[in-house]
Amino acid sequence: MKIIVAVVLLAVAVVIEKKTDWATWQYLLLFLVPYLVVGWDTLKEAAEGLLHGEALSEDFLMSVATLGALGIGFMPGAETQFPEAVFVMLFFQVGELFEEMAEGRSRKSIAHLVDIRPDTAHVERDGQWQTVHPEQVLPGETILIQPGEKVPLDGVVLEGSSSLDTVALTGESVPRSIREGDEILSGCVNGQGVLKVKTTKDFGESTAAKILDLVENAAASKSRSESFITRFARVYTPIVVALAVLVAIVPSLITGEWATWIYRGLLFLVVSCPCALVISVPLTFFGGLGGASKKGILIKGSNLMDKLAQLQTVVFDKTGTLTEGVFEVTAVHPEVIDQHELLHLAAHVERHSTHPIAMALRNAYPDEQDSCSITDVQETAGHGVTATVNGKKVAVGNSKLMDRLGAAWHPCHHSGTIIHVAIDGEYAGHIVISDRIKADAAEAIQALKAAGVAKTVMLTGDQESVAAAVASTLQVDEFHAQLLPADKVAEVEKLLQEGTLAFVGDGINDAPVLTRADVGIAMGALGSDAAIEAADVVLMDDKPSKIAAAVQIARRTLRIARENIALAIGIKVLVLLLAVLGLATMWMAVFADVGVTVLAVLNAMRALRG
């Protein structure tokens, strides 16, 4: 509103100036009205900054420049600059308005992006449902989630089935089905079904709260570019202000043309403010962090953008990172009985074991409810399980168990964990169980190579043959198997000497390696809390292909920041030279400051697209 009023008053003042022949001080009073209407806030901010020791602010420099332009008209032989001074302040305010709009849009986009924390939760207490703030719900309590509501806390579904909108957490638009017994994460949006959930964490430790904390604190860590700009502004502005004073005084003492050189000095003051750099570069990184979050990639600080952009080596854990971490039967090789019977016996013997191998066998033969009699079940750690099934002694385990029983086993050409089966001491065949490779694992390796990552490495505690098969399938450059957590750290220490390194893992045992790497990347949806806490980057949907996306976002963000730096410095230097030569106008000076700032901020908003 004040801008519109100032424009009208300025237009009236210009018309009066052209049709009258007043004294200079009368014209000054006339143009002071629109000047104060549009510039009062700027003058006030400049005065407050001066009182607080912040004299070289943008408001102070603009105030001095425009007040100086108003005063030039009173110098002998000088033309009045009243309309120009008001126009400059007006344009400055218009530029500030566009800058606020652009910056507000950027922050609003990020605020919407992380708006995943619900305000209420429906909790069951004393047989009744109460609506409370999620912070008041304790672990172990039962909550009700209606269709369309945000999930307030992490938990396990007790009753109901539904589909979850996980886009705020993972960046994926495909809904995720959920039913009784499944884990549910806060921050998702419930679809069409009513869910009863037993909470497993309090509000502060829930997934939504942790994500908000990560995003809100990410901007606290400055990138090298941001740190450079901060240091640059502290040195640059005082130097240019000192030069402006010299431009105004030294030539004036030599030539006696005070009005001319003071005007040029005022142009220097306007151009000198480094706002385009100080505002747009941090905003670029803020937008980059938001763009990454939109895709389910949480980067814990803008300082990590530099490292991600320079990655030369990416090291992967295998299980849960490149593979699903879920074992399944991939081959059945019977010797004396058919495949169905071999699976039947193995699943019965392993029916009470909690080992992942046993679960894979039971999943392959889910029909355990038959008339078979199973007795004398004995489990030997590191060997396997034996039991009597319908009067026959059945042994299910590794080659050590077969050797102990005297069963003539033989190796298998398939990669994976080989489970041998013997009946009454006679070898009956074997079953191959493998960890399924993630659907996008091969794509992730190829995308990293296409992005210029020099080496991909896989580290695992699994057997050499299993690791070799996975590495060959995925075309990983190098792998190391049968490693303990301490061995992984040692391998990473060696690889760190080859350049910037990222380690990708998901388990508790990966926490030390994640901390040691230049960039630790954790699988967030299925990864352990320890791994997520230790990591620098969290992939919320457990897709390794997102690593290449993170690298591309980091490089794009840095490229936009460099564009803004080049744009701002280049135009400022040009206008400063023109000002010294007397070829620049106040309009050009304002464009070099306000105009470039607006362009740089708008350019910075491109980083939000991720």
Image (cartoon, helix red, strand yellow):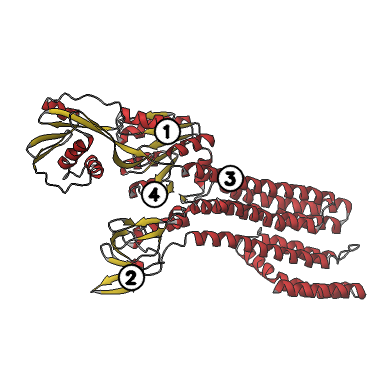
Which residue has dot 4 on it? 524
Circle 4 packing at 10 Å, graded few (<14), some (14-19), many (20+), is many
Identify whether 111 is placed above or below 412.
below
Residue 187 placement: quadrant: bottom left
* Location of mark 1 (residue): 474
- Distance CA(mark 2)–CA(mark 3): 43 Å
Q: Is residue 34 left or right of residue 604?
A: right
Q: Amino acid at mark 4?
A: Gly
Q: Which residue is mark 2?
A: 122
Which one is in front in this view, the residue at disc 1 or the one at disc 3? 1
Q: Give the CA distance from mark 4 to mark 1.
A: 22 Å
Within 10 Å of disc 3 (Cα), the crowding (few <14, some 14-19, many 20+) is: some
Which residue is disc 3 drawn over? 556
Q: 113 or 304: nearer the eye?
A: 113
**How many numbered callouts?**
4
How far apart in space, not on screen, are marks 4 and 3 (Cα)?
24 Å
